[in-house]
């Protein structure tokens, strides 16, 4: 009985640490009333604000002509906390770098040089150096750098700044391989990531960046799957990521033969990591490829721009069964089946790729994949290209889970951000969109939209009054059926349609914590 009692207290303490509270109470009722099962009951889980959040940002670029902006944000109006809280991004220790040619200074949002960017500094910021701090909910904080050796960042937020804390990393690379706009919502640490849409083909350089936030080393397996199944390579097995550090791995070094379309699975044997996959194409630009939603029988990929000149679908079936999928395009007025691309068959353990051609017909929308008879879990992503000839630019749209409580995306620019909201089912959805104050001033704004069933609503988020600097956008489902969302940031330059697309997943602002109700008289037995 002593062991049982200790286990009960340990579980309760763990829940308290995770969600902020857990309650151990004695039940009401008469003495000796009922069985042990009747005396021990579990209440419905309570949803409580998180007490600590983490965000891991990979090293942004090794280019001498790259400029990176970091934006951190916590939505206002969250649950009260006894602690005001802190939110800070610290530099991680570097692994083997792709390029060490650093010559540029770093500036904060006010244009001041910060310590890591002072002239004469020949190396990257030492591990543990503070790069950016957020002081209050509701107002973004920003920092910029032009260094080619800018480090990966390990960030954490606690107290009142933890619920919904979000960090965006946006890099403009002016020239060279991978030229374009590279955007990424910095990830939380985890043990598994799926990246359909990666490549080891000639002309592509895809790097997966592994960042370990903890004080013990993590061991990670990198598994590649092509059109014929697993691409076996000993080089990807047992990759060690030292504590509080980052390791980049070139995917082509894990394959004997080039392959245009592969799926990367990052699986941690021990510990946990943040994984980011950066692509660079000699002709089509580059971007960060966000991880797909967890394997599921259906997939929603929101936010294909109407002027896309190429849309390529990449799907992988990780289970033991093949998958047959219906393909539909949800536009502004309804859902259609693309001619010639009605279905796609995905063999178990293999990657399938389909060029969808002019699937948008000039109208922005979303791709819907649903099980067609044979149901098996899949992961999926789209490679979207805009522009022509030497003015092409590429971004990626992964399968995105439906909005839960709330989703947040930082670093929005006036007249440059577009939201895609899709209701894939038979029920409309009401969605509230809130734009924060700007990083340098202004007032928040909000608007509620109705998304008709089977359609994609593409809108500019409401513009904050008098906003200066970048702002954050928070999306909440008010009522109705499932809704999925993404944000496109477009910053055209010199005739090149620079753009990046970020999926809007739950911002992890709260956690379910069961309330334990225990007959304390049992502890005396």
Image (cartoon, grey):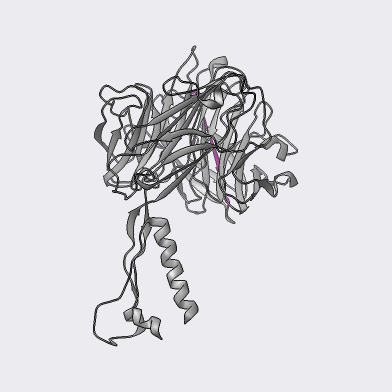
Residue 97 lies, in percent from the top left, at 67, 31
Q: Of all residues shown, which one is farthest toward the bottom?
A: 32
In depth, the one of 325 and 287 nearer the eye is: 287
Q: Does the rendering let one see residue 270?
A: yes
Residue 268 lies, in percent from the top left, at 61, 51
Query: Which image quadrant: the C terminus?
Result: bottom left
Number of numbered markers: 0
Give the side of residue 55 with respect to residue 46, left or right: right
Residue 511 within the magenta-colored segment of the rendering: no
Residue 24 lies, in percent from the top left, at 34, 70
Residue at horizontal 59 percent and vertical 53 percent from the top: 271
Residue at horizontal 68 percent and vertical 46 percent from the top: 239
In depth, the one of 498 and 421 nearer the eye is: 498
In depth, the one of 172 and 178 nearer the eye is: 172
In depth, the one of 245 and 227 nearer the eye is: 245
Give the side of residue 83 with respect to residue 317, left or right: left
Residue at horizontal 73 percent and vertical 45 percent from the top: 233
Quadrant of residue 75 in the image?
A: top left
The part of the chain drawn in magenta is 309-318
Quadrant of residue 280 in the image?
A: top right
Q: Does the rendering let one see residue 305?
A: no
Position above or below: 25 against 454: below
Quadrant of residue 505 in the image?
A: top left
What secondary structure is the magenta-colored segment mainly?
A: strand
Residue 519 lies, in percent from the top left, at 33, 78
């Amino acid at each position: 009985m002593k062991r049982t009692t200790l286990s009960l207290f340990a579980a309760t303490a763990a829940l308290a640490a995770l969600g902020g509270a857990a309650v151990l109470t004695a039940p009401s009722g008469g003495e000796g009333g009922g069985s042990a099962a009747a005396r021990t009951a579990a209440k419905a889980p309570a949803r409580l604000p998180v007490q600590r959040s983490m965000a891991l940002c990979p090293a942004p670029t090794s280019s001498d002509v790259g400029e990176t902006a970091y934006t951190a944000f916590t939505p206002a109006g969250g649950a009260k906390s006894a602690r005001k809280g802190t939110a800070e991004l610290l530099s991680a220790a570097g692994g083997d770098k792709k390029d060490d040619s650093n010559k540029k200074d770093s500036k904060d949002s006010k244009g001041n040089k910060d310590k890591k960017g002072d002239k004469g500094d020949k190396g990257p910021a030492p591990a543990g150096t503070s790069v950016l701090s957020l002081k209050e909910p509701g107002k973004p904080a920003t920092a910029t750098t032009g260094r080619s050796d800018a480090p990966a960042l390990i960030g954490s937020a606690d107290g009142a700044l933890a619920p919904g804390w979000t960090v965006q990393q946006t890099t403009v690379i002016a020239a060279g391989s991978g030229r374009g706009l590279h955007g990424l919502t910095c990830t939380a640490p985890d043990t598994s990531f799926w990246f359909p849409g990666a490549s080891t083909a000639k002309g592509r350089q895809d790097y997966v960046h592994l960042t370990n936030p903890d004080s013990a080393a993590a061991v990670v397996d990198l598994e590649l799957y092509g059109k014929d199944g697993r691409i076996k390579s000993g080089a990807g097995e047992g990759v060690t990521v030292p504590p509080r550090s980052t390791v980049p791995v070139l995917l082509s070094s894990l394959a004997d033969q080039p392959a245009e379309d592969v799926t990367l699975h990052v699986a941690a044997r021990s510990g946990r990591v943040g994984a980011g996959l950066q692509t660079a194409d000699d002709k089509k630009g580059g971007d960060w490829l966000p991880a797909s939603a967890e394997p599921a029988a259906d997939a929603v990929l929101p936010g294909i721009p109407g002027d896309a000149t190429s849309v390529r679908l990449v799907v992988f079936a990780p289970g033991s069964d093949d998958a047959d999928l219906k393909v539909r395009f949800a536009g502004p007025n309804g859902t259609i089946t693309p001619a010639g691309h009605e279905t796609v068959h995905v063999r178990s353990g293999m990657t399938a790729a389909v060029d969808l051609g002019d699937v948008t017909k000039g109208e922005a929308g979303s791709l819907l994949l649903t099980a067609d008879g044979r149901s098996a879990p899949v992961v999926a992503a789209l490679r979207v290209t805009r522009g022509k000839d030497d003015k092409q630019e590429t971004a990626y749209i992964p399968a995105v889970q439906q909005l839960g409580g709330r989703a947040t995306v930082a670093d929005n620019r006036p007249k440059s951000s577009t939201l895609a909201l899709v209701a894939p089912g038979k029920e409309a959805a009401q969605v509230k969109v809130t734009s924060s104050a700007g990083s340098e001033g202004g007032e928040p704004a909000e608007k509620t939209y109705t998304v008709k069933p089977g359609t994609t609503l593409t809108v500019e988020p409401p513009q904050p009054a008098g906003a200066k600097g970048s702002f954050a956008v928070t999306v909440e489902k008010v009522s109705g059926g499932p809704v999925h969302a993404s944000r496109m940031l477009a910053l055209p330059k010199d005739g090149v349609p620079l753009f990046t697309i970020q999926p809007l997943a739950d911002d992890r602002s709260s956690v379910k914590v069961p309330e334990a109700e225990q007959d304390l008289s049992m502890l005396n037995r």
